[in-house]
Image (tube, rainbow, N blue to C red):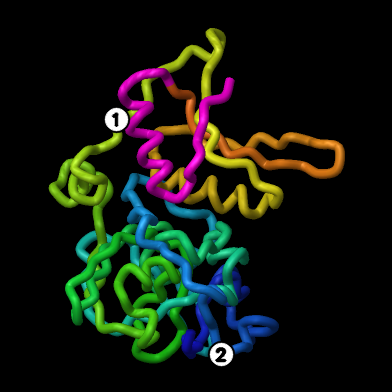
Protein backbone atom coordinates (compact mmCIF):
# COMPACT_ATOMS: atom_id res chain seq x y z
CA UNK A 1 0.00 0.00 0.00
CA UNK A 2 1.20 3.49 -0.82
CA UNK A 3 2.26 5.32 2.30
CA UNK A 4 0.34 8.53 2.80
CA UNK A 5 1.69 11.71 4.36
CA UNK A 6 -0.97 12.76 6.80
CA UNK A 7 0.70 15.44 8.84
CA UNK A 8 0.28 15.68 12.58
CA UNK A 9 -2.83 14.53 14.38
CA UNK A 10 -3.46 15.36 18.00
CA UNK A 11 -3.92 12.02 19.69
CA UNK A 12 -2.23 12.53 23.01
CA UNK A 13 -0.19 15.66 22.44
CA UNK A 14 0.26 17.63 25.61
CA UNK A 15 -0.64 20.65 23.51
CA UNK A 16 -4.14 19.30 22.99
CA UNK A 17 -4.86 17.68 26.31
CA UNK A 18 -3.32 20.39 28.40
CA UNK A 19 -4.18 23.40 26.26
CA UNK A 20 -0.57 24.53 25.97
CA UNK A 21 2.01 24.55 23.20
CA UNK A 22 4.33 21.59 22.90
CA UNK A 23 6.73 20.30 20.25
CA UNK A 24 5.90 16.81 18.97
CA UNK A 25 8.26 13.97 19.76
CA UNK A 26 8.55 10.23 19.16
CA UNK A 27 5.93 8.95 16.73
CA UNK A 28 4.43 12.45 16.41
CA UNK A 29 7.59 13.72 14.74
CA UNK A 30 7.18 11.13 11.97
CA UNK A 31 5.27 12.50 8.99
CA UNK A 32 4.33 9.22 7.30
CA UNK A 33 1.48 7.03 8.46
CA UNK A 34 0.25 3.76 6.98
CA UNK A 35 -2.47 1.16 7.16
CA UNK A 36 -2.30 -2.59 7.86
CA UNK A 37 0.52 -4.54 6.23
CA UNK A 38 -2.03 -6.69 4.40
CA UNK A 39 -5.48 -6.16 2.96
CA UNK A 40 -8.17 -5.89 5.66
CA UNK A 41 -11.87 -6.03 4.84
CA UNK A 42 -13.66 -3.48 7.01
CA UNK A 43 -16.88 -3.40 5.00
CA UNK A 44 -18.65 -5.25 7.83
CA UNK A 45 -17.71 -2.63 10.45
CA UNK A 46 -20.93 -0.76 11.32
CA UNK A 47 -21.14 3.01 11.44
CA UNK A 48 -20.94 4.70 14.81
CA UNK A 49 -24.35 4.85 16.48
CA UNK A 50 -25.09 8.38 17.73
CA UNK A 51 -26.07 8.50 21.38
CA UNK A 52 -26.29 11.24 23.98
CA UNK A 53 -23.01 11.47 25.92
CA UNK A 54 -21.53 13.97 28.36
CA UNK A 55 -18.50 15.96 27.31
CA UNK A 56 -15.24 14.13 27.84
CA UNK A 57 -13.11 15.28 30.73
CA UNK A 58 -10.12 15.36 28.38
CA UNK A 59 -9.62 17.12 25.06
CA UNK A 60 -12.15 19.92 25.53
CA UNK A 61 -10.01 22.69 27.00
CA UNK A 62 -10.53 25.90 25.06
CA UNK A 63 -8.61 27.59 23.68
CA UNK A 64 -5.64 25.28 23.14
CA UNK A 65 -2.44 25.77 21.16
CA UNK A 66 -0.64 23.37 18.83
CA UNK A 67 2.50 24.26 16.89
CA UNK A 68 2.03 27.94 17.68
CA UNK A 69 -1.58 28.13 16.49
CA UNK A 70 -4.56 28.58 18.78
CA UNK A 71 -7.84 26.67 18.40
CA UNK A 72 -11.23 27.20 20.05
CA UNK A 73 -13.56 24.32 20.92
CA UNK A 74 -17.19 24.88 19.88
CA UNK A 75 -19.77 25.22 22.62
CA UNK A 76 -21.97 22.79 20.70
CA UNK A 77 -21.84 20.76 17.49
CA UNK A 78 -25.39 21.84 16.63
CA UNK A 79 -25.70 23.19 13.10
CA UNK A 80 -22.11 22.42 12.13
CA UNK A 81 -21.68 21.68 8.41
CA UNK A 82 -18.50 22.16 6.40
CA UNK A 83 -16.90 21.10 3.14
CA UNK A 84 -13.19 20.57 2.79
CA UNK A 85 -10.42 17.99 2.62
CA UNK A 86 -10.39 14.84 4.77
CA UNK A 87 -7.34 12.72 5.49
CA UNK A 88 -6.93 9.53 7.49
CA UNK A 89 -4.65 8.12 10.17
CA UNK A 90 -3.75 4.54 10.90
CA UNK A 91 -1.17 2.21 12.34
CA UNK A 92 1.21 4.83 13.70
CA UNK A 93 -1.41 5.80 16.27
CA UNK A 94 -3.26 2.48 16.64
CA UNK A 95 -3.46 1.50 20.33
CA UNK A 96 -2.41 4.92 21.63
CA UNK A 97 -4.56 7.39 23.52
CA UNK A 98 -6.85 9.83 21.76
CA UNK A 99 -7.25 13.39 23.00
CA UNK A 100 -10.19 12.47 25.23
CA UNK A 101 -8.29 9.58 26.83
CA UNK A 102 -9.74 6.64 24.87
CA UNK A 103 -7.68 4.14 22.88
CA UNK A 104 -7.45 4.77 19.15
CA UNK A 105 -8.62 1.81 17.09
CA UNK A 106 -7.98 2.27 13.37
CA UNK A 107 -10.61 -0.42 12.67
CA UNK A 108 -13.32 1.55 14.50
CA UNK A 109 -15.49 4.34 13.10
CA UNK A 110 -13.92 7.41 14.64
CA UNK A 111 -12.36 10.72 13.66
CA UNK A 112 -10.28 13.68 14.80
CA UNK A 113 -11.45 17.30 14.50
CA UNK A 114 -9.88 20.54 15.65
CA UNK A 115 -12.90 22.25 17.19
CA UNK A 116 -15.95 19.99 17.62
CA UNK A 117 -16.74 19.07 21.24
CA UNK A 118 -15.52 15.62 22.28
CA UNK A 119 -17.31 13.36 21.72
CA UNK A 120 -19.45 14.39 18.75
CA UNK A 121 -21.07 12.43 15.94
CA UNK A 122 -20.83 13.50 12.30
CA UNK A 123 -21.85 12.20 8.90
CA UNK A 124 -19.03 12.37 6.36
CA UNK A 125 -19.83 12.25 2.64
CA UNK A 126 -17.17 11.67 -0.02
CA UNK A 127 -18.18 14.26 -2.63
CA UNK A 128 -16.49 12.35 -5.46
CA UNK A 129 -18.52 9.14 -5.10
CA UNK A 130 -21.42 9.92 -2.75
CA UNK A 131 -20.39 7.33 -0.15
CA UNK A 132 -21.27 8.20 3.44
CA UNK A 133 -20.23 7.11 6.92
CA UNK A 134 -21.12 8.11 10.46
CA UNK A 135 -18.17 8.49 12.82
CA UNK A 136 -17.66 9.43 16.45
CA UNK A 137 -15.23 12.32 16.96
CA UNK A 138 -13.02 11.56 19.95
CA UNK A 139 -9.71 13.13 18.96
CA UNK A 140 -8.03 16.39 17.96
CA UNK A 141 -6.51 17.12 14.55
CA UNK A 142 -5.60 17.18 11.75
CA UNK A 143 -3.05 19.93 12.37
CA UNK A 144 -2.15 20.14 8.71
CA UNK A 145 -3.11 23.10 6.57
CA UNK A 146 -6.29 22.81 4.55
CA UNK A 147 -7.71 19.66 6.15
CA UNK A 148 -10.88 19.68 8.21
CA UNK A 149 -11.11 16.11 9.55
CA UNK A 150 -8.92 13.04 10.08
CA UNK A 151 -10.75 9.74 9.68
CA UNK A 152 -9.90 6.32 11.04
CA UNK A 153 -8.55 3.74 8.58
CA UNK A 154 -11.90 1.91 8.58
CA UNK A 155 -13.91 5.06 7.88
CA UNK A 156 -11.56 6.11 5.09
CA UNK A 157 -11.74 2.63 3.57
CA UNK A 158 -15.53 2.68 3.53
CA UNK A 159 -15.40 6.07 1.79
CA UNK A 160 -12.99 4.60 -0.78
CA UNK A 161 -10.33 7.25 -0.16
CA UNK A 162 -7.35 5.17 0.99
CA UNK A 163 -5.58 5.19 -2.35
CA UNK A 164 -5.44 8.95 -2.70
CA UNK A 165 -4.89 9.62 0.99
CA UNK A 166 -7.29 12.55 1.00
CA UNK A 167 -10.78 13.32 -0.34
CA UNK A 168 -13.09 16.27 -0.69
CA UNK A 169 -15.88 15.70 1.81
CA UNK A 170 -18.86 17.26 3.48
CA UNK A 171 -18.97 16.93 7.26
CA UNK A 172 -22.29 17.44 9.02
CA UNK A 173 -22.93 17.17 12.76
CA UNK A 174 -25.60 14.75 14.02
CA UNK A 175 -27.82 15.50 17.01
CA UNK A 176 -28.13 12.14 18.81
CA UNK A 177 -31.40 13.23 20.43
CA UNK A 178 -33.21 13.51 17.10
CA UNK A 179 -31.19 10.97 15.10
CA UNK A 180 -32.69 7.91 16.82
CA UNK A 181 -36.11 8.70 15.32
CA UNK A 182 -34.87 9.65 11.86
CA UNK A 183 -34.96 7.63 8.64
CA UNK A 184 -31.15 7.70 8.65
CA UNK A 185 -31.14 5.72 11.88
CA UNK A 186 -33.35 3.04 10.36
CA UNK A 187 -31.11 2.72 7.30
CA UNK A 188 -27.87 2.72 9.30
CA UNK A 189 -29.06 -0.04 11.61
CA UNK A 190 -30.26 -2.33 8.86
CA UNK A 191 -33.93 -1.21 8.75
CA UNK A 192 -34.47 -2.22 12.34
CA UNK A 193 -33.47 -0.43 15.49
CA UNK A 194 -32.16 -2.69 18.23
CA UNK A 195 -34.66 -2.66 21.07
CA UNK A 196 -33.33 -1.61 24.48
CA UNK A 197 -32.36 -4.43 26.80
CA UNK A 198 -35.06 -5.74 29.10
CA UNK A 199 -34.57 -5.39 32.81
CA UNK A 200 -32.97 -8.45 34.34
CA UNK A 201 -32.89 -9.21 38.04
CA UNK A 202 -29.23 -10.06 38.83
CA UNK A 203 -30.35 -12.17 41.78
CA UNK A 204 -32.12 -14.55 39.43
CA UNK A 205 -28.93 -15.23 37.50
CA UNK A 206 -28.17 -12.74 34.75
CA UNK A 207 -26.77 -14.06 31.49
CA UNK A 208 -24.29 -12.32 29.20
CA UNK A 209 -23.31 -12.70 25.58
CA UNK A 210 -19.58 -13.33 25.39
CA UNK A 211 -18.22 -11.89 22.16
CA UNK A 212 -14.60 -12.93 22.56
CA UNK A 213 -11.67 -13.81 24.80
CA UNK A 214 -8.42 -11.97 24.16
CA UNK A 215 -4.86 -12.53 25.27
CA UNK A 216 -4.09 -8.80 25.36
CA UNK A 217 -6.01 -6.49 27.67
CA UNK A 218 -5.57 -3.62 25.20
CA UNK A 219 -7.39 -5.61 22.52
CA UNK A 220 -10.23 -6.35 24.92
CA UNK A 221 -10.50 -2.64 25.79
CA UNK A 222 -10.72 -1.75 22.08
CA UNK A 223 -13.50 -4.31 21.59
CA UNK A 224 -15.34 -2.97 24.63
CA UNK A 225 -15.19 0.59 23.34
CA UNK A 226 -16.47 -0.43 19.90
CA UNK A 227 -19.35 -2.43 21.38
CA UNK A 228 -20.33 0.37 23.77
CA UNK A 229 -20.69 2.69 20.80
CA UNK A 230 -22.67 0.11 18.81
CA UNK A 231 -24.96 -1.04 21.63
CA UNK A 232 -26.15 1.89 23.74
CA UNK A 233 -28.07 0.77 26.80
CA UNK A 234 -26.19 -2.49 27.24
CA UNK A 235 -23.43 -3.11 29.74
CA UNK A 236 -20.14 -4.17 28.17
CA UNK A 237 -17.71 -5.66 30.64
CA UNK A 238 -14.26 -7.24 30.66
CA UNK A 239 -13.95 -10.36 32.84
CA UNK A 240 -10.36 -11.62 33.32
CA UNK A 241 -9.81 -15.38 33.47
CA UNK A 242 -6.50 -16.41 35.03
CA UNK A 243 -5.02 -19.57 33.56
CA UNK A 244 -1.87 -21.37 34.56
CA UNK A 245 0.41 -19.51 32.16
CA UNK A 246 -1.61 -16.48 31.03
CA UNK A 247 -4.72 -14.37 31.50
CA UNK A 248 -7.62 -14.19 29.07
CA UNK A 249 -9.72 -11.04 28.94
CA UNK A 250 -13.33 -11.97 28.15
CA UNK A 251 -15.58 -9.28 26.68
CA UNK A 252 -19.27 -9.74 27.52
CA UNK A 253 -22.47 -7.83 26.69
CA UNK A 254 -25.65 -7.91 28.73
CA UNK A 255 -27.55 -8.75 30.78
CA UNK A 256 -29.66 -10.54 28.14
CA UNK A 257 -32.77 -12.70 27.99
CA UNK A 258 -33.64 -15.60 25.72
CA UNK A 259 -36.01 -13.72 23.43
CA UNK A 260 -36.22 -12.24 19.94
CA UNK A 261 -34.09 -9.28 20.95
CA UNK A 262 -31.22 -11.67 21.70
CA UNK A 263 -31.22 -12.89 18.09
CA UNK A 264 -30.97 -9.30 16.88
CA UNK A 265 -28.16 -8.62 19.35
CA UNK A 266 -26.21 -11.67 18.15
CA UNK A 267 -26.69 -10.58 14.55
CA UNK A 268 -25.38 -7.11 15.31
CA UNK A 269 -22.34 -8.46 17.16
CA UNK A 270 -21.52 -10.88 14.33
CA UNK A 271 -21.81 -8.07 11.77
CA UNK A 272 -19.10 -6.23 13.71
CA UNK A 273 -16.72 -9.13 13.16
CA UNK A 274 -17.17 -11.13 16.38
CA UNK A 275 -18.12 -14.41 14.79
CA UNK A 276 -18.62 -16.76 17.75
CA UNK A 277 -20.68 -15.01 20.45
CA UNK A 278 -22.19 -17.36 23.04
CA UNK A 279 -24.16 -17.10 26.25
CA UNK A 280 -22.47 -17.32 29.64
CA UNK A 281 -23.80 -16.99 33.19
| Image point (38%, 27%), residue name | 262
Rendered position, 62 above or below 227? below
Rendered position, 92 above or below 232? below
Residue 178 visible at all: no
Q: Secondary structure at mark 1?
A: loop
Q: Residue 162, image x and y in percent?
A: 38, 80
Write down the residue under mark 2: 31
**Dot 2 surroundings within 10 Å: few (below 14), some, or many (20 or more)?**
few
| Image point (61%, 88%), residue name | 30
Q: Which mark is residue 195?
A: 1
User: Image check: 259 left or right of 94?
Assistant: left
Q: Nearer the viewer, residue 51 or 77?
A: 51
| Image point (68%, 49%), residue name | 217
Q: Secondary structure at mark 2?
A: loop
Does the segment drawn in magenta span residue 278? yes
Judged from this view, the residue extending furthest toward the top is 204
Q: Residue 94, image x and y in percent?
A: 58, 68
Range shown magenta: 257-281
Residue 171 visible at all: yes
Q: Residue 187, image x and y in percent?
A: 19, 49
| Image point (62%, 66%), residue name | 96
Q: Which mark is residue 131?
A: none
Q: Nearer the viewer, residue 79 or 250?
A: 250
Judged from this view, the residue extending furthest toward the right is 244
Amino acid sequence: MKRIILGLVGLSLVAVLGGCSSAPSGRYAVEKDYGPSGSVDVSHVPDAVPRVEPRSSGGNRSPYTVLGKSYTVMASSSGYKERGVASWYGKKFHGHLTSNGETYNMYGMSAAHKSLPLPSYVQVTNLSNGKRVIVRVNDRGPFHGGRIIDLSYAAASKLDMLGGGTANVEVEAIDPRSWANSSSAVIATGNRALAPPEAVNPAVGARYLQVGAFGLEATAIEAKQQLQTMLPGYQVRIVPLKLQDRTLYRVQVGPVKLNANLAELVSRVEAAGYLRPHLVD
